Amino acid sequence: MAKQIHIRLDDAVYDAISQYIHGTNISMQDAVSTALMQFLMRKMRDSASDAAAFTFIDLFAGIGGMRIAYEQAGGHCVYSNEWNKYSRQTYFANFGEQPDDDITEVEENSIPDHDVLVAGFPCQPFSIAGVSKKQSLGRATGFEDKTQGTLFFDVCRILKAKRPKAFMLENVKNLKSHDRGRTFKVIMDSLEELDYEVFDAVLDGQSYVPQHRERILLVGFDRKRYGRGFTFSFNITHPEIKPVMKDILETDVDAKYTLTDKLWSYLQNYAAKHRAAGNGFGYGLAVPNGISRTLSARYYKDGSEILIEQEGKNPRRLTPRECARLQGFSDDFVIPVSDTQAYKQFGNSVVVPLMTDVAQLVVDKMKELDFEKEKEHPCNKTAATCSDDVATGKKVVVTA
């Protein structure tokens, strides 16, 4: 329940807020409330950062699924970015932080230093026109040429400028086959050029949630810091008991989620038409003791890919809370937006417990590499820097 207070603002503060909200649908009250929340959360984060095992940034953050994963692995988020205003609303409601809204407008050196870069970047084709022209003229090309105009370019320029110890990138399974494999090749070549040791795997979240959801993950470690030749495994110990659909269903569901006779008739006729043509298109009825199809961002349209049977009624779509559970979000995760926006947000999100386990693997490997580096160079520097210290007569203490 909202509490009402009265505060006085200096003219300068009032004018600054008025200028900030001009042309938006944000009220003065909401702007002041948001500013106060961000100030308090920043103070709390500053205190928490001292105790955190590592720092990370959250790019293309969505509603914060990856942030939850890396916070549970012991990390402290020092920067976030998300362009969609409704996702930013959900992000703020849960983390008390308003992400930056356009990564292309952010100067890379303004981003805080961090240990891990986390990003669920969109899958976009790369234009080869400019690259082909340079190659025909015998000119060298790099990631700036190959990725320009895509959001992956922004990931690369931040990696180049900030050189985090590690990164984790998430995308749809079809990234490898996108644009006949050219998209994936440009990505891998770009990360190779940036001198990161990269590992990839396609993982399915169905051991954690009752949903078939395959995603590709790219994990990289800084070769300039750690060298080459080490390994990384996506070997995860899955939960012993796999959840099923009935585990995530609510008991008291509003009638508005039940399909109308018109929509249910349309979906049945649509499925019958495609079955007759030998296609697999159609609605999907989720079995209570089974798993569902992949939840997509288009679920808001008709919910046809995941329907729940009801005795004596037409099937119903999932509620937003059920969609949250299907992605592994806890029930205390706040959903402040409309059903339509919530369906889009959860459909675009990640399976949180799976990402949490992978995040822990990344953090454990980072610790292992840091330990090995410390053993090799107790001065906590690179081999070249340690050698320079010895050559210039600086005292270096080495312990056995």
Image (spheres, rainbow, N blue to C red):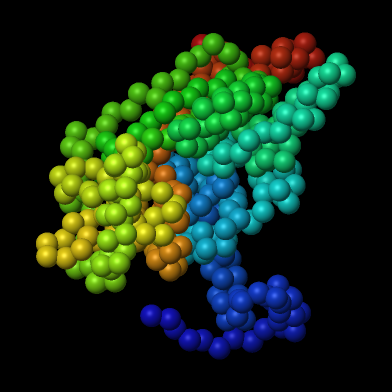
Residue drawn at (60%, 70%) of the image = 35
Residue 307 is left or right of residue 16, and the answer is left
Residue drawn at (50%, 22%) of the image = 199
**Image-quadrant location for residue 293:** top left
User: Relative to 94, does residue 109 appear above or below in the rendering?
Assistant: above
Q: How many marks?
A: 0
Residue drawn at (22%, 60%) of the image = 315
Residue 183 is left or right of residue 2, and the answer is right
Of 103 and 315, which appears nearest the observer? 315
Q: In the rendered view of the protein, which quadrant contains the N terminus? A: bottom left
Q: Locate residue 227, reporting x and y percent.
A: 60, 15
**Image-quadrant location for residue 340:** bottom left
Residue 221 is left or right of residue 332, and the answer is right
Of 93 and 252, which appears nearest the observer? 252
Q: Residue furthest right?
A: 137
Q: Locate residue 75, reporting x and y percent.
A: 48, 42
Q: Locate residue 163, reporting x and y percent.
A: 66, 32
Q: Locate residue 311, reporting x and y percent.
A: 12, 62
Residue 18 is left or right of residue 64, and the answer is right
Residue drawn at (52%, 32%) of the image = 175
- Can residue 58 be seen in this snapshot? yes
- Can residue 321 be seen in this snapshot? no
